[in-house]
Image (cartoon, rainbow, N blue to C red):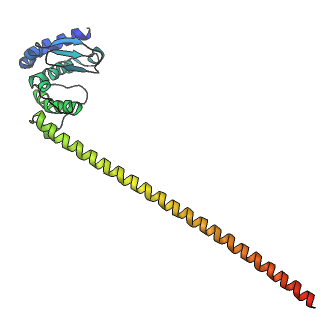
Amino acid sequence: MTPLQKMIEARKRLILDYPFWGTLALKLKLKEDFSHPRGWTDGKVLGFNSNWVNTLSMSQTIAFNAHEVGHPMLKHHLRREERKYRLYQKCCDLALNPILIKAGFELPGKPLFEERFEGMSVEEIYKIRDEEEKQEMAEELEKQKELEKQEELEKQEKGENDEDKDESRDSSNGAGNKDESEDQDEKENENENEDEW
């Protein structure tokens, strides 16, 4: 069975087992597309990567069809507006996947799912996730500033320690010169005494 035949068979079973989802699936034209790692839809076409479809069981292929059908059903492709693409795509899945799981579909891999978002719209989810991402970025920036501050303090301390070592070395050298000078004076005094004798 080729990947395309597998997708067609999955649609047939979708119609029999899940008539609502199967009817919606018939509205999307199937298109093989290796440029995408898994699949996509624009509301008219359901693109799929044949290599990925080959890794799926039939029940997972059925769920994959339902998943792609679910996005245009919820008008996700029309509601993005100015929202960030990648975050919006994740939020679409977070809004759709609970519906599919509740309906009994076996979603492939590790589908995006957070119980707290169940029953929420993609806009509501996006607002929450966007604020969380901003907060995470702010915390990460604060950590970076603290790290840079700590590194700067360590550099300053190292510089001060190096200066102290240099001063200590100079002081030791000066003391040594003084001792040599005193020894020289003592020798000269001894010589003078010898002359007087």
Closer to us: 172 or 53 = 172
The correct choice, above or below, for 43 with respect to 149 in the image is above
Closer to us: 134 or 97 = 134
Farthest bottom residue? Answer: 197
Is residue 107 visible to the viewer in this orientation of the structure? yes
Q: Which residue is at 21% across, 44% downward?
A: 132
Position of residue 47 in the picture relative to residue 145 (left or right): left
Image position, residue 83 (x, y; %): 18, 33
Q: Which residue is at 19% across, 43% downward?
A: 131
Q: Quadrant of residue 44?
A: top left
Q: Which residue is at 22% across, 8% downward?
A: 5
Q: Which residue is at 36% across, 54% downward?
A: 146
Image position, residue 175 (x, y; %): 69, 74
Position of residue 2 in the picture relative to residue 71 (left or right): right
Q: Quadrant of residue 121?
A: top left
Position of residue 20 in the picture relative to residue 161 (left or right): left
Is residue 16 visible to the viewer in this orientation of the structure? no
* Quadrant into which the N terminus falls: top left
